[in-house]
Image (cartoon, rainbow, N blue to C red):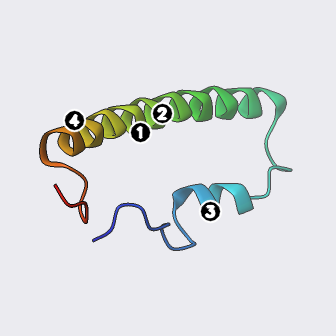
């Protein structure tokens, strides 16, 4: 499986983006924003760790398809 390919539509983020926010109170929206900001930080941390891991592997083994 290629990690660089986009995920199919319909993942959790796509579903959240399509949700009607009208029923939520201001407090509920503030709570939702805080949760989403925490999730963004978690995803960024994971992305950065994955990029670091990939860079280390590329440095050790070389990038696929490169003559070496």
Tell me if 44 is positioned left or right of 25 in this view: left
Left or right of 16 on screen, residue 57 = left
Quadrant assignment for the N terminus: bottom left
Label whose residue precedes the other's in the sequence (4 or 3): 3
**Label located before the other in sequence (2 or 4):** 2
At which x and y percent is residue 25? 81, 35
Question: Which is nearer the N-term, disc 2 or disc 3?
Answer: 3
Q: Which residue is mark 2?
A: 44
Q: Nearer the viewer, residue 38 or 53?
A: 53
Residue under the point 32% across and 32% down = 49
Marks 1 and 3, how far apart in space? 21 Å
Q: Secondary structure at mark 2?
A: helix
Residue at mark 2 to residue at mark 4: CA–CA distance = 18 Å
**Tag 1, which secondary structure?**
helix
* Residue receiving disc 3: 15
Mark 2 and mark 4 in contact? Answer it, CB < 8 Å. no
Question: How many residues crowd around disc 3 within 10 Å: few (fewer than 14), some, or many (20 or more)?
Answer: few
The residue lying at 13 percent from left, 47 percent from top is 61
Q: Which residue is mark 1?
A: 47
Task: Please report contact status of discs 1 and 2: CB closer than 8 Å, yes or no.
Answer: yes
| Relative to 66, 24 lies left or right | right
| Left or right: 25, with 49 as reference point | right
> Dots 4 and 3: beta carbons under 8 Å?
no
């Amino acid at each position: 499986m290629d990690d660089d390919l986009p995920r199919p539509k319909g993942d959790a983020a796509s579903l959240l983006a399509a949700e009607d926010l009208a029923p939520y109170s201001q407090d509920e929206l503030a709570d939702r924003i805080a949760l989403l900001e925490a999730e963004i930080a978690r995803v960024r941390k994971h992305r950065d760790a994955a990029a670091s891991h990939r860079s280390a592997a590329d440095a050790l083994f070389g990038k696929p398809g490169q003559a070496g």
